[in-house]
Amino acid sequence: ALFWGLAEPRVPASVASILLALDPLTAIGTALSDWTVVGWTWLGLAVLALTAVFGRFFCGWICPLGTLQHVVSWIAGPERRKRYKINRYRRWFSIKYIVLVALLTWAALGTNHIGWLDPIPLLHRAFASGIRPLWHGGLSPGGWVSFGLLAAILLLSAWMPRFFCRGVCPLGALMGVFARLAPFRIHRDETGSCTSCTLCVFACQGADEPLDKHRVSECHVCLNCLGSCAEESLHYGVARTAGPAPMPALDVGRRRFLLTVAGSAAFAPVLRAAGSGGEGSAEDAIRPPGALAEDSFLSRCITCGACSASCPTGVIRSDIGKTGVEGLFTPILDMRRGWCEPSCIRCGEVCPTEAITTVNPDAKQAIGGPAEVTIGTAFVNRGRCLPWGMETPCIVCEEMCPTSPKAVWLETVEITRRDGKAITLQRPSVQPELCTGCGLCENRCPVGQQAAIRVSSIGETRDPRNQMLQRRATS
C-alpha cells in the first residue's frame, strides 16, 4: 500500500522518492560513479551519520524490505524450538561485506550497480516492474526477474528470519561498519541479573547474539531482546566501554578485502563489454525523456524503478537483454505497453539521482516545428503496414500522431489490386524532424505482435552520436 500510494501522480515528487533519498548506499554509490551528490540523496549521508551515533536503526525501524521479511518470518518462520540455533551468528554472514566492497568498487570505476542488491531500490523495482504491471497489461521479462528475486528473499525469510539482511544486504553491511562507532548500543548490566534464559536470542532479528558477545555491527536496534528479557538485564543507551566494537575476523581481513577490490576491478570491464557495444544507445532501447547521455545515465541510474512506478501509461519497464549486463534493470520504453504522454514529465520529477532530468513539458511537444526534446524517431515498416504491404485501408498512426503539424503524413495513391479492382489508399510516411518518438502511433497500430510503425532511439536529442545521418569521415 505504501508503494502504491507513492506512485500516485498527486503525490509530490519529493515524497514519492523519499525512501530512496534516505538510502546512504544510493548517495555513496552515485557520488563514486558520477563524482557528485545529486538531488535529495544527501539525506542518505545524514542517515549514515545518525547510524554512527544510534546504530542500525534504519534497518530495524525504517527499511520496508526488512519489515516484509519480519512479517514473513512471524507468519511462516521456523518453530520456536529451532529458533535458538537459527538465530546464532554464522561466518558466512560476512558475505554482505564482500558484496558491498564489490558494488562500491564498480561504482568507483563508473559502473553503478548499487541498485541490484540495495534493498530500497530492489523493493521499489519489484513493485514497479513485478507487481504494479499486473494491473497494467502484464509483466515484462524484467518484471518477472524482479518479482522472482523479491519472492526468493521472502521465502528464505521463512527459513531464517531476515535472511537477506543477515547475509547479503550491502546497505546493512555499510551501516554495520558505521554502527561499530555508535555510543548508543544494547548492553547488559553488571549486576548479574541475567539468568541466561536465552529469550533474547529467540527474539533477535539480526543474529547479533545479545546473550554472549554482542555484535553491534549486526544489531538492527529492533529492541526485541529488551522486550523479551524478564529480568530487565538488557538496556539500550550509552555503553560504558569506549571505542568501536570488534567485528568478526572474516570481515576485516585485509587480504580478503584487497582480493575483493582487485577481483571487482578486473571484472568491471567485462560488465562494460557486455553492454550495448559502446556506440551510444541500442537502437530499440528507448530511454525516458530527459535521460542523460548513455554513459552518464548508466553511472547515475540505480535501477530503482521509481520512473516506471510513476508512469501514467505504463510504458516504462525494466530492461533485460537490450542494453546488456551494464544496463540490466535500467528503464526503457515499451511502446506496445504504453506511450510517452507529450505533456508528462513525471519520470524526471521522481528520479532520485537525476539520471532522468526534469524537462519543460513544452519542450517535448512539436507544436509549429521540431521539439526541443525527443526520445527517438518512428519508422514505417512497409512490409507490415496495411496500406503499403496488404493493400488495406488504415490511417490509425496518422490519426494518433499528437504533433502539429503531424509527423506522420499520408500520401493518397490509386492502385489496381490483383483482382483488377481499382482502390484508393492513404499510405503513411514519417517526417523525422517533427517526430518526438512518443510512440502513440506504435501503441495504437492494429497490426499484431510487432507493429508496422515502430519507434527507434535514433534521433534522440540526449545523444549527438545517435542521429539519423552520421558524418562521413574526411581525409
Image (cartoon, rainbow, N blue to C red):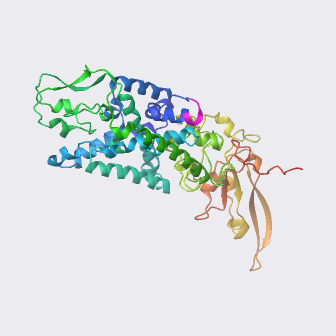
Q: Quadrant of residue 351?
A: top right
Q: Residue 87, relative to residue 441: is it above or below?
A: above
In this figure, what is the number of numbered marks? 0
**Residue 119 visible in the shown view:** no
Of residues 359 and 430, the one nearer the viewer is 359
* Vertical order, 130 against 229 (above or below): below
**Which of the pair 48/423 is nearer the observer?**
48
Q: Residue furthest bottom?
A: 419
Q: Write down the region rendered in magenta.
A: 32-36
Front residue of 221 and 145: 221
Residue 34 shows up from this direction: yes
Q: Is residue 42 left or right of residue 402?
A: left
The secondary structure that most of the magenta stretch takes on is helix
Q: Residue at x 48, y 55 (%)?
A: 137
Residue 96: x, y in percent?
Answer: 39, 42
Whether the magenta-drawn stretch holds residue 34 is answered as yes
- Give me the residue at 10% from left, 26% from top: 193
Residue at 35% over, 28% down:
180
Point out the residue furthest to the front here: 255
Would residue 238 appear left or right of 202 to someone viewing this image?
right
Q: Position of residue 77 (x, y in %)?
A: 23, 48
Screen quadrant of the N terminus: top left
Where in the figure is residue 52, as x and y percent of width and height? 38, 25
The image quadrant that residue 362 belongs to is top right
Residue 467 is a magenta residue? no
Most extreme residue toward the right is 475
Residue 186 place in picture, x, y as percent: 25, 27
Residue 55's place in the image compared with 286, above or below, is above
